[in-house]
Each structure stands twice: as C-alpha cells, then as structure tokens.
C-alpha cells in the first residue's frame, strides 16, 4: 500500500512539474521595427516623455475588418477586436507600458504620419472624471491615441489624446473622439531612437 501511495505521489509531482514548465514558456516577442521618444509639452500627470515602439503595422485588410466589426457590433465589438492583437508598446515617462493595438503608417512627400491606438494606461484612467469611471476604467473612452509626423531623419512633432473613443464613420474611416476635445497635449521633439 505504501508503495502504491509513493508511486502515485511521484507521478502527480512529475505531472505538476511538467505542466508548470509548459505554462512558463513565453511566446517570443516581436521585433520592434520603429521606436520613438517625444517630450510632452506641458508634462502630463507628472511625466515629461512618451516613448513608443511599433512591432507590426496594421494592414488595410485589418482596418476593413475593424470597420465591418464596428458596423455590425458597434463600439463594444471594436473594443473586443482591438484587444486581441498587439502591434507594439507605448510608455508615459517611467510608468507602466501599455500595448499598442493599432498602428497606421503613411508616407507622402518625405513625411511619415503615424497614428497609434493603445490601451489607455491605468494612470490615465485613475485621473479621469469620477462620473465616467467604472472599477475597470472608462467605459466609453478606453484608448490612448498618439499621432506624429516625422521627417526622413525620424524627427517631428505630434499630439496625444490620453482618453479616446474609436469609431468608424459611414465610409468606413476611423474617427478618434477625445474625452476632452479642448485639451489635447502636444508632443514636441519627437525623434527616432531606432
């Protein structure tokens, strides 16, 4: 009886160790294609910089799929769809980083325009008006939107909308709506670090 009990305990221990080893494996990270740092003018919530890295650009097909999702399921459908993928990261100062879920890049006449939608960090959510909060953050404005224009050397300017809503118009074009339209912080001294 003791032999069976010891054998069973050894088997269960080996099984648990094998399962734990499998769960500990992480997916390899994507390679950051572009990385930028910008100064906030003026500082936002005590931070004076924003950094972000794009791992993958959102394709036209993905944008069309998001527009169709919005047409069929509205803002809730878009939120679910966007949270499924990671396109990079952004970080406010030294605070926690957040995932970029949509990264649009266009180029004309030597100017690159980057439009980035990321999951709004807890720091932004905690600072918002109490009437718009739930225990999980803002229901209507769960995103941060960063828009920059850079030259061929990777230098430029932009803006950041700390709390935004993402919708699509009747033509299937994305529209970003800020929580506070009159107070959109500027990004100055945007420069490439990669």
Image (spheres, grey):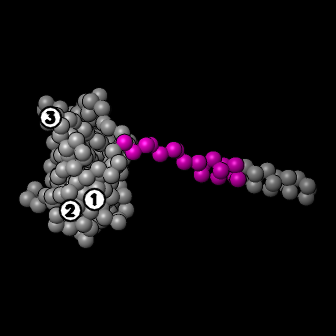
Q: CA separation, marks 2 and 1?
A: 7 Å
Toward which corner of the image does residue 78 lie, by quadrant?
top left
Mark in the foreground, 3 or 1: 3
Q: Pointer 2: what residue? A: 40
Give the residue at mark 1: 50
Q: Is residue 173 above or below residue 79?
A: above
Dots 3 and 1: beta carbons under 8 Å? no
Identify the disc placed on residue 109: 3
| Residue ranking furthest to the bottom | 46
Residue that appears at 39% across and 45% down: 32
Residue 9 seen in the figure = yes
Q: Which residue is drawn at 73% across and 49% down?
A: 15
Q: Residue at (59%, 48%) from the top-left corner?
A: 25
Q: Is mark 3 on a helix, strand or loop?
A: loop
Residue 117 placed where, x, y %?
26, 47
- If you read the primary sequence from the N terminus, does the residue marked by circle 2 or circle 3 appear first? 2
Q: Nearer the viewer, residue 34 or 9?
A: 34
Q: Mark 2: which secondary structure?
A: strand
Question: Of the residues under marks 3 and 1, which one precedes in the sequence?
Answer: 1
Do the residues under discs 2 and 3 have CB atoms within 8 angstroms?
Answer: no
1 relative to 150 in the view: left or right: right
Q: Is 18 contained in the magenta span? A: yes
CB atoms of marks 2 and 1 within 8 Å: yes
For the question of whether residue 118 can be seen, the reply is: no
**Between marks 3 and 1, how big is the CA–CA gap?**
26 Å
Range of magenta residues? 16-33
């Amino acid at each position: 009886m003791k032999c069976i009990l010891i054998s069973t305990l050894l088997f269960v221990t080996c099984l648990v160790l094998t399962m734990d080893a499998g769960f500990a494996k992480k997916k390899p990270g994507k390679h950051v294609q572009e990385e930028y740092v910008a100064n906030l003018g003026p500082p936002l919530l005590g931070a004076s910089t924003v950094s972000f890295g794009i791992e993958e650009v959102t394709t036209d097909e993905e944008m069309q799929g998001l527009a169709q999702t919005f047409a069929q399921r509205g803002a809730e459908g878009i939120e679910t769809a966007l949270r499924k993928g990671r396109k990079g990261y952004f970080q406010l100062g030294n605070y926690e980083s957040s995932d970029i879920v949509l990264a649009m890049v266009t180029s004309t006449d030597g100017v690159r325009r980057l439009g980035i939608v990321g999951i709004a960090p807890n720091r932004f959510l905690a600072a918002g008006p109490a009437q718009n909060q739930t225990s999980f953050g803002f229901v209507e404005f769960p995103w941060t939107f960063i828009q920059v224009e850079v030259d061929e050397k990777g230098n430029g300017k932009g803006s950041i909308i700390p709390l935004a809503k993402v919708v699509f118009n009747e033509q299937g074009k994305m529209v970003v709506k800020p929580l506070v339209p009159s107070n959109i912080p500027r990004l100055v001294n945007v420069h490439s670090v990669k």
